[in-house]
Image (tube, grey):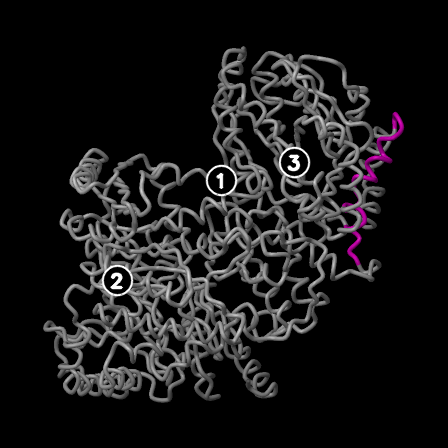
């Protein structure tokens, strides 16, 4: 590690030389210390250049200080090539644009930080796309793809990245900048002045003395997925030396990519998917070659182990049931001018494979194809964790062999796993012989590390026996570079070293990768460090064997959280673009805190506190993260521990909004008090004082209380009368009871219309959510225990509990055993008994259809984050369809209010920016006859306070009551928010 004074001087000079952000702080170094691999290297510092002048200035300062450099994209690399003890140049923050699309030449000019999906979107209007498409396509950068020679599932049709790069603008570590591509006249190039001419002369000499070795070892018949080592074969091109191709796959060890011109391919107008089921993955692999003769777009393989992991980790996800019968599957995609042509090609493959005994399913509907592809694309995360908290790791991630030998390789590979006492579930690009696998290595003990190393050496030998490459897609990095000597001769290894020396004679570009590699069993992130926190925690971490430290290891850098669209994760990152506000960034800081490696203050860490400050506790990561990182739970634990014994240091919002159920109980205890409270809240001076005292954002309005709370409206419904009607217990959550009791009246009316007897518990009950999210877990635990005791008679009778507020329902459904323990029988029963209103109504779809009296309703629906994470929206879709409500479900994620988050001082701007991403534009764009459906009180409050078009958000209970004729179109609301409905259902 460099001396602090030297690092400080370097940072000062960088800050005076570049306009972008220079980050040498502990939190930034911690967040950039890991990628998607097993390795950890704390950088010297991070620079986020705003333009190419910044890049040149950074390289110049680094040259004068003699420090290593590491150009970086999205940092999803699985080999460890995007972490190092170097100055990291992060291109993903600002240098992320598509500069030009030339549809005639079928090329695109891009900055290195551009995300692949953004390039594809820019090319789409011209009917073009970029061929290579890794499963990380919605977050990986073109610079990273070029550095790793990425491939993806469609390389059968369109090749690797090296086959799709035309020209590179590169900057060498000594400041030399040059544009490289195919050079037909090598002699002329050698005459160029200065360093550029020297590069061509040295490479020409290297080619002349190594071409026989290169042809023998790198040009292997049938092996299309060789990614290991350097592309020295690009120096042998008969049409001229291709230096752009030679630099593809160099992993930042030779030069910094400034811009790239890449080739585009014609995108099929339509696609179809033929899924083939075989007795096992071996038999599936045996049938790859005859399928290749049909020239499909892709041939992907999935082993039954991936499906088993999916079933166990996502029991509510039934997508795997759509697969045809088998224990090994091939996904074969075809393209055509229209769906009929693509489908015909897929069906032809299916007919041929059926003669070999395969079960066949052909799908051409886009949504159905996306659902099936999601199984494959989430494979790396799915197989990383078992339901009991067992861990699996990369390391032997993506070796490739000629497709003709893949079946035999798989059989021998599984035998090798067994000999070493290891297990792994695999999937991969079977059409090109490339296998992805996560293995249950023990990386926590020295015997485990010895086994890890021994296995990798044997696995490399097995690949060499099959004429393969130790990397077929993800590059060498630290994970596999040491293994190159098992597959290549010493002469070729020397040639790799000579090639790097041409570009980087001082060895400052990403040292220790590819050439002169660090050992593959050194620097493993889970093996080092002295824990700074004890084993005792407030929550139980039932999916991580009771260990918070184990939970912090869940994040493996898949980086799905740094996408800009798709799913709900991660709202604050999508607004700020800051790594610290991504699930990945927060998880890395928590890992560093737990392990004591870089964040030494344990639970008192201010770095972790600041990173969690903008976490909305929306729980979206729990669902969207392939490995199930649950940042909301980790935040609750951290806040509890951080303020333990320091209650006075808690933010004022923890007392005002954390204790909201108690304040509301007092405010609604006496008739007339709600109206008085509302009147006082409308006085700006008094409201301002209250908000300052409560730590509430001054821009926020205090939501009005209903004139009469729920219990005064419905009376006593706790008596258990003899009745043949099925009973339901309605959970009177704080928000519905105090603010929107009219939706409970509608829910009761609908349920009774369907023949239920609806009861309410005796006394006050609460799920404890507000205390949980503010980390006041002792209080939350006490509140929950009292509430469960209050409803125990109904639990004893087996009566289902129906929740109306999604956040409270999700807490009852999911968080109780984390709070009270998995052995608490009443908590387990409570979780099992809890239903959403939609889930109850979904068992009466025929009755709903038959009972609809109001038709033609249209709606846009904002799904509450906790419902999305814990319960899903399938039942709601089915109910809305049965009610005849034409519904567009919004998919931009969190509304931004997220309980107390959007009300807290300092969060207003992020909260509103979240809403502006999709929710508010959709509400403003909805016509007057369209209902705005938002079951969550937070979502409704955000709409009420930020929408200026007059839409009053409604609950599913309202739509159901009106559709069934149980409520008049015109009626006064009993809430404090005016009319209950809008559009044709409104009064």
Res. 195 image quadrant: bottom left
Quadrant where the image shows the C terminus: top right
Which residue is nearer to you in this view: 90 or 634? 634
Local SS, label 2: helix
The residue under label 3 is 809
Please say if 933 is above or below 94. above
The residue under label 1 is 891
The residue under label 2 is 409
Say if residue 448 shows up in the picture: yes
Span of residues in magenta: 650-672
Is 243 on the left-hand or right-hand side of 873?
left
Q: Determine crowd level at label 1: few under 14, some 14-19, many 20+ residues with C-alpha closer than 10 A.
A: some
Numbered badge on residue 804: none
Based on the picture, tell me whether residue 666 belongs to the magenta stretch: yes
Give the foreground label among 3 and 1.
Answer: 3
Is 751 on the left-hand or right-hand side of 193?
right
Is 264 on the left-hand or right-hand side of 22?
left
Of the numbered discs 2 and 1, the one sitting upstream in the chain is: 2
Of the numbered discs 3 and 1, the one sitting upstream in the chain is: 3
Give the foreground label among 2 and 1.
Answer: 2
The answer to whether marks 2 and 1 mark residues whose Cβ atoms lie closer than 8 Å is: no
Find the distance from the CA under tag 3 to the CA under tag 1: 21 Å
Which residue is nearer to you in this view: 695 or 491? 491
């Amino acid at each position: 590690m460099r001396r602090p004074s030297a690092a400080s001087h370097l940072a000062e000079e960088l800050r005076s030389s570049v306009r972008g952000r220079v980050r040498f702080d502990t939190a930034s170094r911690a967040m950039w210390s890991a990628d998607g691999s097993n390795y950890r290297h704390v950088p010297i510092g991070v620079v986020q250049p705003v333009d190419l002048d910044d890049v040149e200035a950074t390289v110049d300062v680094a040259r004068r200080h003699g420090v290593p450099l590491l150009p970086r994209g999205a940092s999803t690399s699985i080999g460890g090539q995007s972490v190092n003890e170097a100055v990291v140049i992060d291109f993903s923050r600002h240098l992320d644009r598509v500069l030009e699309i030339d549809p005639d030449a079928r090329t695109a000019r891009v900055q290195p930080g551009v995300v692949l999906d953004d390039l594809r979107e820019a090319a789409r209007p011209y009917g073009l796309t970029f061929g290579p498409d890794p499963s990380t396509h919605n977050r990986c950068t073109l610079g990273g793809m070029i550095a790793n020679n990425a491939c993806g599932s469609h390389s059968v049709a369109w090749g690797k990245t090296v086959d799709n790069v035309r020209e590179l603008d590169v900057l060498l570590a000594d400041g030399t900048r040059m544009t490289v591509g195919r050079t037909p006249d090598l002699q002329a190039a050698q005459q160029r002045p200065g360093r550029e001419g020297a590069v061509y002369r040295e490479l020409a000499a290297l080619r002349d003395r190594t071409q026989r070795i290169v042809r023998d070892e790198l040009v292997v018949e049938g092996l299309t997925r060789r990614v290991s080592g350097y592309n020295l074969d690009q120096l042998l091109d008969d049409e001229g030396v291709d230096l752009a191709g030679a630099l593809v796959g160099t992993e930042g060890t030779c030069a910094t990519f400034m811009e790239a011109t890449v080739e585009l391919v014609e995108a099929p107008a339509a696609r179809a998917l033929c899924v083939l089921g075989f007795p096992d993955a071996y038999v599936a692999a045996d049938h790859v070659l005859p399928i290749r003769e049909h020239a499909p777009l892709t041939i992907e393989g999935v082993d039954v182990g991936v499906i088993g992991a999916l079933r166990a980790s996502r029991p509510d996800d039934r997508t795997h049931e759509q697969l045809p019968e088998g224990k090994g599957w091939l996904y074969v995609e075809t393209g055509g001018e229209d769906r009929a042509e693509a489908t015909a090609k897929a069906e032809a493959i299916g007919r041929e494979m059926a003669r070999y005994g395969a079960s066949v399913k052909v799908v051409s509907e886009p949504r159905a194809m996306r659902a099936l592809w999601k199984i494959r694309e989430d494979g790396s995360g799915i197989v990383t964790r078992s339901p009991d908290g067992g861990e699996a790791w990369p390391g032997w991630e993506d070796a490739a062999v000629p497709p003709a030998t893949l079946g035999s390789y798989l059989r021998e590979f599984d035998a090798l796993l067994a000999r070493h006492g290891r297990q792994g579930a695999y999937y991969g690009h079977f059409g090109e012989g490339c296998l992805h696998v996560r293995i249950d290595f023990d990386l926590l003990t020295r015997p485990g590390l010895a086994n890890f190393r021994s296995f990798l050496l044997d696995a490399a030998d097995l690949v060499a026996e099959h004429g393969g490459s130790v990397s077929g897609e993800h590059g060498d990095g630290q994970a596999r570079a040491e293994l190159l000597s098992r597959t290549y001769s010493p002469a070729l290894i020397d040639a790799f070293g000579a090639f790097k020396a041409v570009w980087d004679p001082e060895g400052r570009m990403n040292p220790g990768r590819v050439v002169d590699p660090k050992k593959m069993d050194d620097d493993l992130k889970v093996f080092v460090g002295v824990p700074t926190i004890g084993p005792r925690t407030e929550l139980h971490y039932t999916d991580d064997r009771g260990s918070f430290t184990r939970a912090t290891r869940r994040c493996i850098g898949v980086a799905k959280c740094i996408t800009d669209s798709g799913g709900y994760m991660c709202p604050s990152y999508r607004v700020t673009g800051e790594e610290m506000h991504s699930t990945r960034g927060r998880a890395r800081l928590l890992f560093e805190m737990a392990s004591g490696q870089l964040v030494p203050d344990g639970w008192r860490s201010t770095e972790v506190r600041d990173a969690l400050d903008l976490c909305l506790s929306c729980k979206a990561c729990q669902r969207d993260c392939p490995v199930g990182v649950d940042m909301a739970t980790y935040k609750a634990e951290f806040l509890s521990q951080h303020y333990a014994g320091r209650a006075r240091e808690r933010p004022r919002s923890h007392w005002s909004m954390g204790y909201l159920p108690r304040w509301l109980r007092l405010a609604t205890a006496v008739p007339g008090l709600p109206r008085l409270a509302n009147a006082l809240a409308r006085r700006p001076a008094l409201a301002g004082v209250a908000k300052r005292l409560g730590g509430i954002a001054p821009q926020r309005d205090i939501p009005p209380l209903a004139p009469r709370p729920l219990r005064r409206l419905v009376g006593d419904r706790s008596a258990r009368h003899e009745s043949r009607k099925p009973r339901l217990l309605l959970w009177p959550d704080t928000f519905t009871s105090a603010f929107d009791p009219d939706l409970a009246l509608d829910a009761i009316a609908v349920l009774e219309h369907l023949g239920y007897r609806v009861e309410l518990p005796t006394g006050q009950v609460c799920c404890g959510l507000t205390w949980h999210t503010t980390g006041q877990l002792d209080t939350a635990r006490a509140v929950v225990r009292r509430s469960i005791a209050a409803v125990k008679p109904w639990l004893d009778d087996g009566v289902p509990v129906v929740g109306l507020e999604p956040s409270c329902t999700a807490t009852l459904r999911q968080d109780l055993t984390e709070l009270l323990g998995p052995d608490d029988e009443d908590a387990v029963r409570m979780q099992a008994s809890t239903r959403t209103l939609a889930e109850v109504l979904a068992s009466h779809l025929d009755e709903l259809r038959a009972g609809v009296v109001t038709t033609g309703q249209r709606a846009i629906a904002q799904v509450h984050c906790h419902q999305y994470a814990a319960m899903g929206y399938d039942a709601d879709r089915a109910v809305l369809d049965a009610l005849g409500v034409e519904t567009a479900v919004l998919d931009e994620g969190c509304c931004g209010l997220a309980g107390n988050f959007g009300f807290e001082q300092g969060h207003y701007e992020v909260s509103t920016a979240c809403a502006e991403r999709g929710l508010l534009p959709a509400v403003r764009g909805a016509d007057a006859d369209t209902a705005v459906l938002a079951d969550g009180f937070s979502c409704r409050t955000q709409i009420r306070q930020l929408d200026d078009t007059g839409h009053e958000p409604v609950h599913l209970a309202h739509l159901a009551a009106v559709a069934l004729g149980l409520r008049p179109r015109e009626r006064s609301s009993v809430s404090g928010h005016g009319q209950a409905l809008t559009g044709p259902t409104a009064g």
